[in-house]
Amino acid sequence: MKIYFPQWQGSGTGQGIEDGAKTILEYVNDAEFINIPLSTAEAGISGKKIHDINNYEAITDQLSRLKKEVDNNQPQTIQIIGGDCGLEIVPVSYLNQKYPKLGVIWFDAHADINRPCDSPSCNFHGMPLRTLLGEGEKNMNPLLFSTIQASQIHYIGLRDIDDAEQERIDNGNIYAPTKLDIEDVVQILTSKKITHLYLHFDFDCLEPADYDKTYYRVPNGLKIEEAETCIKALQHHFTIAGSSVLESVAISSSELKPIENIIKMLML
């Protein structure tokens, strides 16, 4: 199943995120991608904070639509062009229910594992993994198909971590290396008997000097070549059940040129 879901409300004001998703959709030019309409509830500057989550009503409204669409289709695989990282609670929880040996690869500069009460920003795109663990806002649990375990999470490119997130990573012994070692990633996944993967790819995992059309720009990231090599290795050793490309703010196909191989590997 191929989904276009340019959710931006999870990032607060979300400037450029919806346009960035549309740019990738137009670049991919694949009629199989279906569009999930976004909520008309107030969001952004005029949005409301409920349960310590900005734009809560809009987020839950549109994620309910996404969940219903996935549930109705019962796909074997999911590819998503988005959008902010908060949307991941639906595809990951669905594929986790379908594939008992699922590993979640989180290409991201950020840990995205805050509880609402710990989040400095109160933006939901910093909370999806905690929600997927079943430790987030309980009123969002009906949006999940299942919950995951900390051992299923594997970070790549992580370098901007809140204190509460670091504590959860440490307590859960979550895989979060300071430097990418592809052989080690493969070995760790194999040792856990993981067979299927979900590849979450937030473009801010990349070094801004290589690609800077991202919602956040965090120095000392992955080189594009490193990311490509890692994706290839994961695709070679495991079955890819799902993938996403998120939080690019490129507004033209020319701005996607540096990352076109990544887009093709994950979306085509």
Image: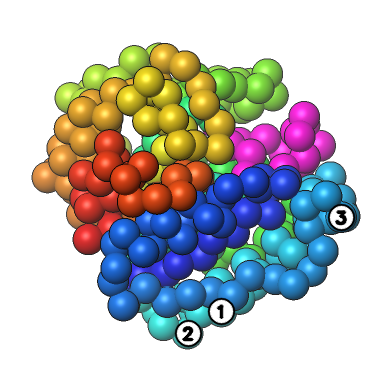
Percent from the top left, x then y, of residue 268? 22, 61
Q: Is mark 1 on a helix, strand or loop?
A: helix
Look at label 3 and name its amino acid: Ser
Read off the residue under disc 3: 46
Q: Distance between the residues labelled 1 and 3?
A: 27 Å
Prevailing secondary structure class for the magenta stretch in the rendered image: loop
Give the Cα separation between the discs numbered 2 and 3.
33 Å
Amino acid type assigned to the residue bearing label 1 in the image: Lys
Q: In which quarter of the image is residue 175?
A: top left
In the image, what residue occupies the spot 61% across and 36% down?
113
Residue 260 position, x and y percent, is 25, 46
Span shown in magenta: 111-126
- Tell me which residue sits at (38%, 63%) in the image: 25
Residue 72 tag number = 2
* Up-down relation of residue 223 to residue 72 (above or below): above
- The mark that comes first in sequence, 1 or 3, is 3
Q: Do the residues labelled 1 and 2 touch (CB within 8 Å)?
A: yes
